[in-house]
Amino acid sequence: MPERQSYDHGTPSWIDLSTSDPAGAQEFYGAIFGWDFDAQPTDQGSDYIMASKAERATAGIMQQAPEQAQLGIPPMWNNYITVTDIDSAVAKVGPAGGTVMMEPMQVMDAGRMAVLVDPTGAVICLWQAGDHIGSEVVNEHGALTWNEVQTPDVAGAAKFYGDLFGWTTEEMDMGDQGSYTVFMLNGDGVAGGMAPPMEGIPPHWATVFGVDDADVCAEKVRSAGGTVVVEPFDLPIGRQAVIADPQGAVFSVIALADQSST
């Protein structure tokens, strides 16, 4: 179902964009996904911009922290995984081989978050919901559809996330693209894992949005000032493209072959 009212423990549930130009990002993503935006003040003094479709929350946009820009960290999409008890989840990180980058913190009435680094170097956020469950719509055009960790050590990542969330793995045959690791939770695929597609890409969590037509979306990206990093290509599950927004944040879009699965 595209609409969500809750997320189980260990399920990817939210994404937000840390960008050098929130206004430019709104213009770009509004053009390609049809999002609406609502700027909400925060305790840090800058707005947190909620993106939505038909009044259903889809993603967040925020100003990149100055210290990140000074370190040369590019604009990026952050991925969040829901946990029922964030303190208990964070306590497992060290013994499982990861590092806590940011201890649990309260985000007003929305919930609590933490940031960690898995043993392979990929950063992931945890979310314990308060008033905000995460994305209220998924698996449709302009909405979160998939999250995947890209790392040269998929097995190491799988062990870590298995210890944290109880994920198991299944291998999917992707034809010419080789084997793809699917992380399973209670019998459902919730995320994926693969080696980075090109040399020099550091371990990271990638965000994939659903679209009705990957080729049409690629043309909209160009018209809106973005870059098509990888032209649309066919996979057994659909047609995918890799995109960079005008500020440099990279994400993917996919038109699923079986749209009824959404």
Image (spheres, rainbow, N blue to C red):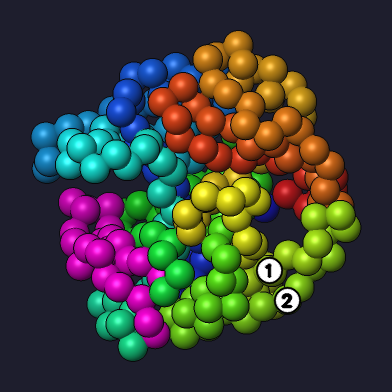
Q: Which residue is mark 2?
A: 170
Which contiguous range is marked in magenta?
96-118
Q: Nearer the viewer, residue 57 or 119?
A: 119
Magenta-colored segment: predominant secondary structure: strand
Residue 154: x, y in percent?
59, 71
- Outermost residue toward the top in this view: 223
Residue 87: x, y in percent?
25, 77
- Outermost residue toward the bottom in this view: 95
Q: Which sits earlier in the primary sequence, circle 2 or circle 1?
A: 2
Q: Secondary structure at mark 2?
A: strand
Residue 44: x, y in percent?
12, 41
Q: Which mark is residue 182?
A: 1
Q: Are marks 2 and 1 in contact (CB under 8 Å)?
A: yes
User: Which residue type carries mark 1?
Assistant: Val
Q: Nearer the viewer, residue 171 or 29?
A: 171
At 80% from the left and 38% from the top, the residue drawn is 233
